[in-house]
Amino acid sequence: MGNVENLWTDETGCAFSRDLFAGRKIVPMSPDVSELLKKALALPPEARAALAGSLLESLDDTVDPSVEEAWKHEIAKRIKELDSGKVKPIPWAEARRQITDLLNGR
């Protein structure tokens, strides 16, 4: 389940999220968008990831073929490293903890 607790309401009743690393108020949302976000956060992790990917793709209206090709090679390399056992995946919760620790200077 997503983190609905990261939504707040301001004095006008509009919802917003917070930049969790800096603690700043960001992204004012209309009530419709706020309700949509709450529903999206209630989706299972795989569905949220697919939705997030689709939303991010919708923001990029230009495609650089050389960048796309570079990403294809990078993805293939990483899959090969995973399949060979050269690298070991870690759970998202652990990766997130490590990222937070790095950002907090620990």
Image (cartoon, grey):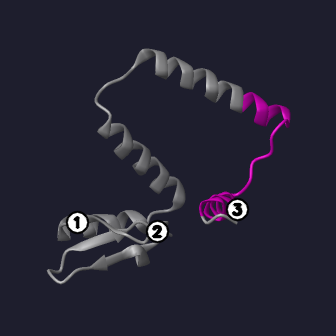
Q: Residue furthest left?
A: 12
Q: Is residue 37 left or right of residue 74?
A: left
Looking at the image, residue 104 lies above or below residue 53: below
Q: Residue furthest bottom?
A: 11
Residue assigned mark 2: 20
Q: Which residues are magenta?
A: 79-103
Q: What's the residue type where badge 2 is placed?
A: Leu
- Which numbered disc, 1 or 3, marks the residue that appears first in the sequence? 1
Q: Residue at x 26, y 80 (%)?
A: 9
Q: Is residue 84 left or right of residue 28?
A: right
Identify the image quadrant of the C terminus: bottom right
> Which mark is on residue 94?
3
Looking at the image, residue 102 lies above or below residue 9: above
Viewer can see residue 65:
yes
Residue assigned mark 1: 29
Q: Closer to us: mark 1 or mark 2?
A: 2
**Residue 96 covered by magenta stretch:** yes
Looking at the image, residue 22 lies above or below residue 83: below
Determine contact: label 1, label 2, CB under 8 Å: no
